[in-house]
Amino acid sequence: MEKRSNVGKKSRFSDRKLYHLSIGKVKNLNRNDWREFEITNISWNVHWQTNLFLAVIIRDYLRFFIKNTPVIGDCAFDDTSKILDCTDEECKAASQKWKGLVNSVADEFDELARHYRGDFDDVDVKSREEKRSELVKKAFADLAFIFDELSW
């Protein structure tokens, strides 16, 4: 009787583990303050592409935030003195601008994630790396612009 190789089984098991990674669990550090926490139980395999995971996490959290939060970020108002007493039209315009800002930053991180996954058509490595470097700078600069407003 022929002995079966375990190589195929190990490979399938390894691939299965990569599809079921844990990006972590929130662990509270202070019983009296829910804002003091850390992320624990991060799968070991996350570290080999942390840049990709962070790009996807930022993209998805931004999209979740803008879909589920009715607040309008202050940076969406041209004149911040009108925030508390804006007209309906001004509030609607600011709301649309805010949604556009947040979604546009999410789109930038989506494009960055595609770069880290290797989803590109060109073969010129140097230009691809330059483009990725520009994307990183722009995405994080735009995230910095809206960052303080990402609370409710």
Image: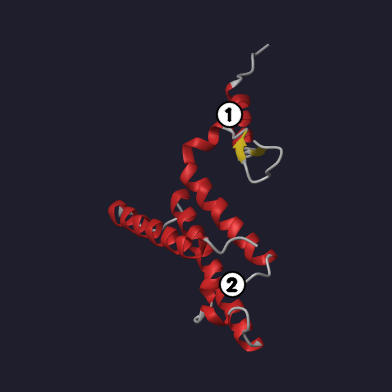
Q: Foreground mark, 1 or 2?
A: 2
Q: Secondary structure at mark 1?
A: helix
Q: Is residue 114 above or below residue 26?
A: below
Q: In what quadrant of the picture does the C terminus appear? A: bottom right
Residue shown at the point (60%, 56%) measured from the top left: 60
The picture quadrant where one finds residue 40 is top right
Q: Amino acid at mark 1?
A: Ser
Choose the circle earlier in sequence order: 1 or 2. Answer: 1
Q: Position of residue 42 (x, y in %)?
A: 59, 35
Q: Amino acid at mark 2?
A: Lys
Query: Between 22 and 149, which is closer to the camera in this rendering?
Result: 149
| Mark 1–mark 2 distance (CA, rounded to whole Å) | 43 Å
Left or right of 131 in this view: 24: right
Query: Between 34 and 124, which is closer to the camera in this rendering?
Result: 34
- On the image, numbered disc 1 is attached to which residue? 11
Q: In what quadrant of the picture does the N terminus appear? A: top right
Residue shown at the point (64%, 35%) measured from the top left: 16
The picture quadrant where one finds residue 142 is bottom left
Query: Between 9 and 13, which is closer to the camera in this rendering?
Result: 13
- On the image, numbered disc 2 is attached to which residue? 99
Q: Position of residue 125 (x, y in %)?
A: 31, 51
Residue shown at the point (55%, 57%) measured from the top left: 59
